[in-house]
Amino acid sequence: MTVSQYEQPGSVQRSSGSALVDVIDTILDKGLVIDAFVRVSLVGIELITIDARIVVASVDTYLRFAEATNRLDLYEKGGAGLPELVGDIAEKGTHGGAKGKTKGMLDAAKETVQEVMQERAEDREERGEPRRRPPRRERER
Amino acid sequence: MKTQPKSETAQRPAPQDTRACYVYGVIRAEARLPEELRGITGGEVTMVRYGDLAGVISEISPGQALGTRDDLLAHEGVVEALAAETTTLPLRFGAVVTTADALIEEMLVPYHDWFAGVLEDLTGAREFAVTGIYVEDAVLREVIEEDPEVAGLRERVRELPEDAAYYDRIRLGELIVKSLEAKRRADTDELVGTLEPYAEAVALRSPAGEDTAGDAAFLVTERDLPDFEAAVDELGERWAGRVRLRMVGPLAPYDFVPPPPEEGA
């Protein structure tokens, strides 16, 4: 099955807003624009927000997958599901077709999961070393 | 490095270079700042008051580009802390003016009534953004079950080598994207319909990707918050297995700030 199986059914993920990936588009695209009010004393600061969007998106995606693998680990100890998961992803990889951009984030994400899973399989002996928690204040019910 | 004309009334001495004033938002003058608030590049966050209004600012160096992860986190951190404390009109990232006095003279004085009115309208309500993300396998199964053409094409594509099925695969993907669009419309309606009774206002947000089932912001009062949250949970349970629900908030009312007034209004 899919990664979602590892989440509690029906749970709603909550975020206080500190997870930047959740709010980056909001703080860059919404809110009052200072130019609408201040004309004379405006300071034109160079904004590098396009880079920021990309960097933030990837960093937070990495953190999310790091978290996802942590959950997987727990599940694995419970004994079921992992081989099935790998099988499902592998299958999707083959009949999913072209690896073009059009497939969008869903498959990109899948591929990343697959990579992470492979790495995890390789590092399996090293399990038990302390894992860093991603610095996010997110809680689930 | 740009040199700005220095105001006589600049609040703090600027030792090495000219300082500029980063603006986070507008709040009521009577509100209190959360303690130990650090702004962009570590500057101290202060209030600059005019009558019953206050701008929230910190000093920055005008010579540097803004937009690193830390900058964005600092901006969001200040606005979030403000919004937790008091009704806050957030400014978009990157608002910089020469001095605190300029902010008063060009923003708070001429637009005083507009700001006061908007703050009044938004009092007591905070924004919550609720996003539904499809569980890919589950929603694809739905599409296959509901659309015989998709099911047929899928079988065909599975049997053929990748190259031979090229156009079939494109057609298959196209049909799926269309189905997902229809599902997104219906699911967005359900999301809004379920939560709207507990909100003062609703703002639809544009879907971030193909896997978005629905995305909307809700303006919720303190009184309605428990009911709103219960409704979110209820929807999360109803959608369990096919849509993952995410709730972000409380946020400053980014999606509910009205368009700025006409000049001089």
Image: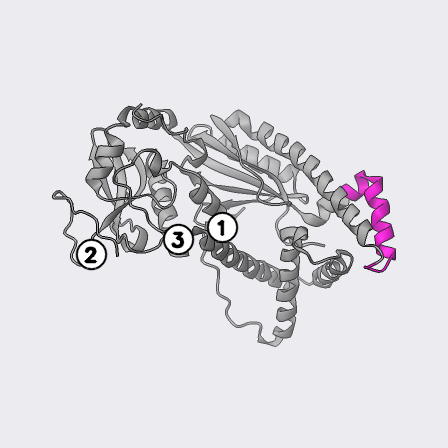
Chain under numbered label 1: A
Along the viewing direction, whichever of A50 and A11 lies nearer the viewer: A50
Report, in whole angstroms, how far the alpha carbon at label 1 lies from the one at label 2: 34 Å
Q: Are marks 1 and 3 in contact (CB under 8 Å)?
A: no
Residue under the image location 46 percent in, 52 percent down:
A50
Along the viewing direction, whichever of B81 and B17 lies nearer the viewer: B17
Q: Reply yes or no: does residue B152 show up in magenta.
A: yes
On the question of residue B64 being in view, the answer is yes
Task: Give the labeled residue for mark 3.
Answer: B67
**Amino acid type, residue under disc 1 in the picture:** Val
Task: Give the labeled residue for mark 1.
Answer: A21
Task: Give the labeled residue for mark 2.
Answer: B17
On the question of residue B31 being in view, the answer is no
Mark 1: secondary structure: helix
- The picture quadrant where one finds residue B162 is bottom right
Left or right of B99 in this view: A30: right
